[in-house]
Amino acid sequence: MINQPATIRYQTLRKLVTGFEKVGAVASSEKLTEAVFRVLISNEADKTYKDALIQIVPKLVKVLMKGPDADEKTKSRCIQCFIQPLSDFLVGTESSALIKSSAARALVAAYSYLDDDTFKYFLVPVVRGSFTEEDYQETTVVDVVLGIMPRLVESDYGWIARGIEIFYGNETYSYRKEALRMICYLASNKFNKEAMQKYIMKIYLKIPHDKAWIIRREFVRSMEYVIDKIFDEDVDNVYNQYIELTHDEQKQVVAGCIEILPTIIRNERIQYKMKELNFIDTFRKLTTFNDNVDVCLIKIIPYLIQLYPEEEEYFLNLMEKSCDSIEEIMRNTVNIIFKQVFDLAHNKNILLNIFEKLANDQSAGIKSEMRRYICDVLSLDTGRFSDLFRSLVEESNFRVKVSIAQHLPVLRTMSFYDDVLVKLTMSGFFGVREVALKEIENCLKENESKRSILFNQFLTYQKGNCHQRQALAYAFAAVSKGNEEYTTKATPNLILMLDDPISNVRISTLIALGKLHSSSQDVKFALSTLLKNEHDTDVHNIAEQIYARIC
């Protein structure tokens, strides 16, 4: 294979997997495996070709280990010719970075095909030796350890911890960074709190003092994965280290401390330490770190208001100042936390100013999102926001309209409630209509006098567009349901709507009649006439169901 022209060699390579699969494990181990092995260990084969060969080795391993005719002999041959060379490539001083990386990927891809004994008594010792022997350590070994981690067990935790400690003791910072990557993986996927405390915390707490600022910054970022997987006393130690790093001489480290705040502040023990050790002083310092307050500091204001209610005005002023930022991300961050802060804070005046600014923001997205809270501010200052509210009711913005519809109960005492309720009921958005129709039912339970007002307003939409006529059918049902007088009034109007040229309107009308349960002769006659003349299959099927239910 080595001495053949490149085109032939690569063609052979493409056929190799098929060849192994066709002849089976036994024949492959006797006739083909040796040839592949010789190419793998040859110094004459070019690196690109050897790399391509390494990439298909996992498929060859599968045949020898899992094939229908695989036996102890084929498995032994697999270890000798494939697993052993890959392991050697992983830590070999003569292996190129390309070969080492490919060998690592191949081992990870192949390990799932190994039986328990081969994995436990051959692969694990090889990886363990590579990972824990300082003379053989390579960063690519970390990829293998992480790759085979799902099959490692608690008895392996000791050598994993030793390897991490040796990696972290390396003078080259890239090795120490790999140690931290391992810790993050273990915290996220493998270790519980007991294992973290027993095997990892001693090493982990050394990292904040690393001489390389990149490692100190990575320590801060690692808190995202570690902080919820350690005991409270360890959280306390990590928090103390974190506070020290907020004073780090390297700006990138301090920036990392700011960046991680929205993540770690969700941890209850961190919140406790922040309150106990007066984090507000650190927060004030961090707000002056750059010319502009960092977005991440604004994100945590809802938490800080709960921890330091006496500082509420300071936090709200910070939010209002951020509304004037030229950076859209800053204004949007205020928009994101607005509702949460609105429900927590007592000083609503500053929040009203914030709403007014962002509800008229130059960004359409921010403006649209903020306007969803119009009902929250309207109840506090009707005069200031009533014009905006009326304009929003007329706009075709689904999210704003559905938000208004959901807040209708708090608007019942306001003069424009009836008009808004009717307009939302006639909305072209089904989701908005659905909420408004439910509000009609609830409203009438509390105030029966609203029935005539709403009914008369609905009558004005009889010549509306198709969406409004469709909505009108449901509105008649909602405003008349449970009241014989208004059921009698609504029924003739619904019967007329059965002649509507739009099939969806006729369907809505049929559903409305079904909800009213009217079994008058006029309804029966109208339904029987419709069944005779209707050509639309959907309308006809629904009419049959309603006729069977009523008549």
Image (cartoon, rainbow, N blue to C red):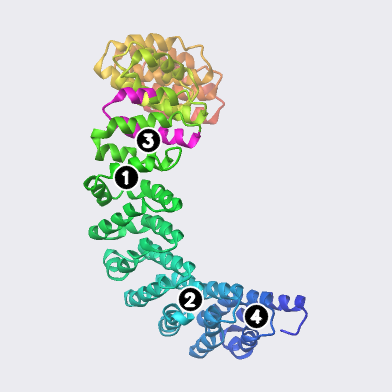
Q: Position of residue 265 (x, y in %)?
A: 32, 47
| Residue behind mark 1 | 282
**Disc 2 versus disc 1: distance between alpha carbons?**
49 Å
Residue 19: numbered disc: 4
- The residue located at (34%, 24%) in the rendering is 350
Extreme residue in the front direction: 249
Closer to us: 256 or 454: 256
**Disc 4 versus disc 3: distance between alpha carbons?**
61 Å
| Residue behind mark 3 | 337
Type of residue at label 1?
Answer: Thr
The residue mark sitting in front, 3 or 2, is 3
Q: Secondary structure at mark 4?
A: helix
Type of residue at label 3?
Answer: Ile
Question: Which comes sooner in the sequence, label 4 or label 1?
Answer: 4
Look at the image and tell me in which quarter the N terminus lies: bottom right
**Disc 3 versus disc 2: distance between alpha carbons?**
47 Å
The stretch drawn in magenta includes residue 406: no
Q: Looking at the rendering, which quadrant does residue 54 occupy?
A: bottom right
Question: Which comes sooner in the sequence, label 3 or label 1?
Answer: 1
Type of residue at label 2?
Answer: Tyr
Residue 111: numbered disc: 2
Closer to us: 362 or 405: 362
Q: Position of residue 325 (x, y in %)?
A: 47, 31
**Disc 4 versus disc 2: distance between alpha carbons?**
22 Å
Question: Which comes sooner in the sequence, label 4 or label 2?
Answer: 4
Question: Which comes sooner in the sequence, label 4 or label 3?
Answer: 4
The residue mark sitting in front, 4 or 3, is 3
- The residue located at (51%, 14%) in the rendering is 464
Q: Secondary structure at mark 1?
A: helix
Which segment is the magenta one? 327-353
The residue mark sitting in front, 4 or 2, is 2
Closer to us: 194 or 403: 194
